[in-house]
Amino acid sequence: MKFSLVVTCYNEMKSLPQWYNNIEQQTRQPDEIVIVDGESNDGTTEYLLNWAKEDTKVRVIVQKCKPARGHNIGNEAATFEHILSTDMGVRLSENWCEELIKPFEQDPRVEVVAGNTCIDKETVKSAAARAEYYIDNGGFSKHGPGFVPGNRSVAYTKKVWRELGGLPEDLTFYADDSVFGRQMLQAGYKMAYASKAMTFWGRPQKLKQFWKEHFNYGKGDGEADIKKPFVVKLWEKGLLPAFMVPFLNGCRTMQKQKWLGAIARTIGSADMVALAVMPILYFGRGYWFAKGFLEGSKSAVNCMECRKRLRPEYRK
């Protein structure tokens, strides 16, 4: 079975050499690599074009666009029916391609394969990053039925992509793959889970970088109207003033988290500094997500097409 690897990028020179090596070391090579570059200005475009000159299976499309548009351009240009998707900024296990394409070959009824992902431990340097690592199950995501696949590690057929209308392009930057993944679940496509197809994603080191990340996540989810925090619902009903929403969501995030596992992992590593940072990280993630969500909610008028894609039960 032949397949295309589709990826978007913009100014990725810091991670591109590693990603190139990851692809070259794959135990099963893509039959085609389609890269949509959003007019990078840090040398990424030149690096990719040189790679394409040396390897005929590499196709580079240079067009200024957001990630969702880039994925749609790349998917449309892909030659083969089966498409693998990832981010250029992640590290891939050597068997990533092999494990993602295998379920399609084993069962022709499979339409979507969800790969796995975890925090790249090599990038966990600061107390904040270590605290997050312990909080998030030692870096591993939950994987199995109900898991929402994202662009970082997923494979699907062109038929699925077309039937779902492609990735939503009316969001500012984030959450397009969260919506698209929920559409896959909503449509009931036959999904397989490739737990050995690992992607490792690097983490920031400073708390303010975590805050920015969660603000952006919240903004995207607010635009898409998914994963709405309970306190935002209270604000929408006029039961809370907007300025209280981030603070209360921070408190609620701390209350909802499963502390015991995270604390046990932290103590087991004798990392008392990370343990001290953990409450701050818990609160901050909830606080800044809610601030972003409120900001994204203001852009709802620009994202109505995206919001029409999901039924209420798949917005959670």
Image (cartoon, grey):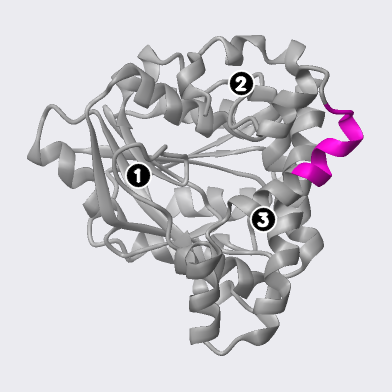
Q: Earlier in the sequence, mark 2 or mark 3?
A: 2
Mark 1 residue type: Lys
- The image quadrant of residue 290 is top right
Residue under numbered circle 1: 57
Residue under numbered circle 2: 169
Q: Is residue 64 visible?
A: no
Q: Earlier in the sequence, mark 3 or mark 1?
A: 1
Residue 309 higher or lower than 134, as above or below: above
Disc 2 to disc 1: CB gap under 8 Å: no
Residue under numbered circle 3: 254
Q: Earlier in the sequence, mark 2 or mark 1?
A: 1
Q: Is residue 9 visible?
A: yes
Dot 1: few (<14), some (14–19), or many (≥20) neighbours within 10 Å? some
The structure residue drawn at horizontal position 83% and vertical position 18%, both measured from the top left corner, is 238
**Residue 17 image offset from top left, x and y in percent:** 53, 65
**Secondary structure beneath label 3:** helix
The structure residue drawn at horizontal position 71% and vertical position 66%, both measured from the top left corner, is 279
Q: Nearer the viewer, mark 2 or mark 3?
A: 3
Residue at far bottom of view: 270
Q: Nearer the viewer, mark 2 or mark 1?
A: 2
Q: Which residues are magenta?
A: 240-248
- The image quadrant of residue 221 is top right
Mark 2 residue type: Glu
Q: Is residue 177 magenta?
A: no
| Along the viewing direction, whichever of 52 and 42 lies nearer the viewer | 42
**Residue 115 image offset from top left, x and y in percent:** 34, 48
